[in-house]
Amino acid sequence: MLALAACDGSAGGGNTSGTVAAGPTADGKDPAQAKLDAYTEGYNKLIGTFGLPETAENYTKADVPNQSPSDSVSVSSGWLEQALAKLKEARALPGGPADLDKSGDALIAALDKVVTRLKGLSVYYDSKAYREDKLARGKQEDAAMRAEFQAALAAAEGFDTILKRERDARTAVEIEQLKKDGNVLAYSTKVAVQRSENLIDLFAKPEDVKNPQLLAKGTAIVAEIEKLLAEQRTAYAAAKAAAKSPIEAPDSSYESAAGDLTDLIGEFRDLKQSGDVEDLNDMVEEYNDAVESLNNIRN
C-alpha cells in the first residue's frame, strides 16, 4: 500500500489506461503487479523520512537569500538519490499502465534535476566554499533550486494520483477475495488501513482540521476502524493459539499494524481537541508506519 505525505494526503481518480503486455516474471508474479509494487516502494521512499517533502522544506528553512558568509549554512540531499534509484528500477520493468510510466518519466526527470543540483550545493556548503565566494553561488542558484523542488513536488503529486488509482483498484480486488475466503485477519487489517487513509483524506487543507462537519465524519470512520481492529485482534489471537509451531503462527506485523492504527486513532482524538495540523501530521506518520507493517506481512 501507499504511504502519504504530511498534511496534504493523496489524490485519486482517473480513467483506466491501456497496459503494456508482458509475460510472467521469473518468480511467476504478474509483471504489472511487480512493477506496481516496485513503483510503490520507490514512491514511499520518496515521500517518507528524509524524502522529497522534508528535504524541500529543510532547504527552504535554510533561507539562503538572507544568510551571510559568516553564518553557518548547510543543506541536505536527504535520501532522494536512493528513492530516485528505486523509481528508475521500477520504470525499467515491463508491464503496467502507459500513463503510469509517462508520469513516472516526468517525476524521474524532475528528481534528476533536484538531485544533481542539490548534490553540488551540498558539497559547496559542507566544504564552507560559501565563505570564500561570499555566498555568491548559493544565492545565484537559490531560485533555480527552489523552482526545481516545486517542479518535483508537482510531478510527485501527479504520479501519486495515477499510482493510487492503480493501487486502489488492485486492493479492492484483494479485499474482495479475502472476504470470500473468510480470511478475517488479513481482511480486517487491510480494510482498517484503507479506512484510515479515508480518515486522513478528509483533511485536504490545514484549515479542515477545525471543521466540525469533517471532524464528525472522522469520528464515524474511527468507530468503523475500531470495530475492524477488534475483529482483527480476535482473529490474530485465535490464529496464534491454533498455531502448532512458530512457523504456523500469524505474522507479528499484523499486531504491529493494529498498534500503529490504534496510535493513529489517538492522534485523531488529540486533533479533535487541539485543532492543530501537527496532530494531523502525526496521524500521517502513524498511517505510514501501519502501511510499512502491512507491507512487511509475509504471504
Image (spheres, helix red, strand yellow):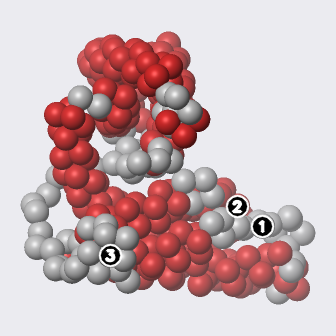
Secondary structure found at label 3: loop
Instruction: Judge left or right: residue 163 versus residue 78.
Output: left
Q: CA distance from mark 3 to mark 2?
A: 45 Å
* Between marks 1 and 2 in the image, the one whose residue lies nearer the viewer: 1
Dot 1 amino acid type: Ser
| Quadrant assignment, res 67 | bottom right
Q: Residues within 10 Å of mark 3 (few under 14, many from 20)?
A: some
Within 10 Å of disc 1 (Cα), the crowding (few <14, some 14-19, many 20+) is: some
Q: Is residue 295 left or right of residue 95?
A: right
Pointer 2 residue: 62
Task: Please determine whether, in this image, residue 258 is positioned above or below residue 152.
Answer: above
What is the spatial separation of the Cα atoms under label 3 and label 1, in whole angstroms? 44 Å
Is residue 203 among what the camera can see?
no
User: What residue is shown at x 10% (from left), y 63% (from top)?
Assistant: 16
Q: Which residue is mark 1?
A: 74
Identify the residue position indicated by label 3 in the image: 25
Q: Position of residue 172 (x, y in %)?
A: 20, 44
Residue at left offset 37%, top offset 71% = 27
Query: Please, what is the three-letter code of the amino acid marked with disc 2?
Result: Ala
